[in-house]
Amino acid sequence: MGESGDWRAWRREFPIFEHTIYLNACSLGPLARRVRAAAVRFLDLWGAHGASAWYEVWLGEIQALRAAVARLIGAKPSEIAILPSVTDALRVVASATADRRRPAIISADLDFPTVPYQWLSRPGAEVRFARSADGTTVSLDAYRACLDDRASLVATSHVFFLSGRIQNVPVLAALAHEHGAYLLVDAYQGLGQVPFDAPSSGVDFLISGGLKWLLGGPGIVYLYVREALHERLDPQGSGWFAHGDPFAFHAEAFAHAPDARRFEGGTPAVAAVFTGRAGLDIVNEIGPARLRARQVELVTDLVAKLRARGWSPRVPEDLADHAGIVTVPMEDPRAAVAFLKERSIVTDSRPGLLRISPYFFNEPADHDAVVDALDTYRRGAGAAATGR
Ligand SMILES: Cc1ncc(COP(=O)(O)O)c(C=O)c1O
């Protein structure tokens, strides 16, 4: 089967395309048949075995998930902690890195808000913002201007959720370390669509999860912690899954696990462990390099078609540091999203922007459909259809 045949076969793995043109992976990756099958397998094991499913299958499944995450980012399974949300991962890192002599945390104004909120909600933390000059990128100088010897952590994005721009993580890691700060990267919008090697990047903490490009659905997040930090950092407010020997049940003696498990909490959501791994298996099977090449092809096609119809997508000429999130400035993007939805085309919006995010299962015909529908919308059918 040729390359395009392969992609068509992958598209058939996602039943939503039988009735919908889905262009919204950056909000929620669509459900794959094998991810649904993994959820059913979890239920079947629970139904057939009850508690013994834990010891016989589920604990092994958690380990297999760590291995799948590690494979994706060139790390070791012992460097991966499993948590339910980005916010939970941030909370545990915040507890482990808090330093009264270094209260400053640096984020970017383009980061997903839950990142700075983690420290804005902590009395005593001093949050500084590296600001974007153009609404799509943040310069290294903007981060540099925020750094001094009061900074403990730079916590920012791999790919900006509003612009699709990819940040240079190795350069950010070097900058943070030069000032004695750690680097935490929120890669929820990056992993899957952008290849990433965690150990060689210098990043200290990397967070991603199933929801979007890793196709595993909600409730499952992966925290990479660089091995050299494990013994140095003691998260606070830990639970039994962070203990070195949870099944020893020593209520009076807490001792952190020697590896990244020390960043975990309590019983994980095992259904999401199953779906998370099934999603990651798809990403690992295709491989990040092929996925990235496919993204560049798709974004190039989408941008050309939008421009040909007079829209001005916010992407640079050179797509080398741009991922699969294409935003188009328009007056009332929510009305456009609703108009497209009525035509079974799923996109989403952020203030002032229509956001279109193709992934490997999309094809150029999807882009023809979206630009055709946007033409109709602009000609006024949109106003009528939405009752304005
Ligand atoms: C970049 C980024 N980080 C984090 C989140 C969500 O964080 P949480 O898992 O805490 O809901 C999102 C969106 O859902 C996101 O786009």
Image: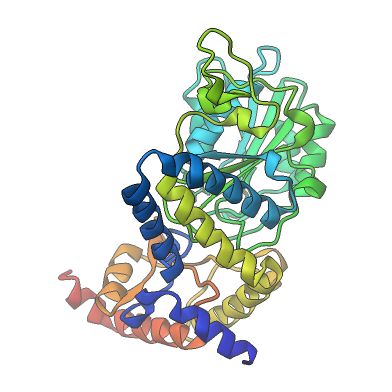
In this rendering, position of residue 215 left or right of residue 146: left
Residue at 28% across / 67% down in the picture? 335
In this rendering, position of residue 173 left or right of residue 278: right
Foreground residue, 300 or 358?
358
The answer to whether 77 is drawn above or below residue 321 in the figure is above
- Image x and y of residue 22, in percent: 40, 73
Q: Is residue 62 visible?
A: yes
Foreground residue, 244 or 234?
244
Residue at 75% across / 22% down in the picture? 232
- Image x and y of residue 382, in percent: 25, 77
Residue at 38% across / 64% down in the picture? 348
- Image x and y of residue 222, in percent: 57, 44
**Quadrant showing the N terminus:** bottom right
Residue that lies at the very extreme toward the top in this rendered image: 252
Quarter of the image for residue 27 reads: bottom left
The answer to whether 301 is drawn above or below residue 154 in the figure is below
- Image x and y of residue 90, in percent: 55, 33
Colour convention of the picture: rainbow
For the image, the number of numbered tags is: 0
In this rendering, position of residue 23 left or right of residue 47: right
Q: Is residue 127 visible?
A: no
Foreground residue, 79 or 52?
52
**Quadrant showing the C terminus:** bottom left
Residue that lies at the very extreme toward the left in this rendered image: 387
Quarter of the image for residue 163 reads: bottom right
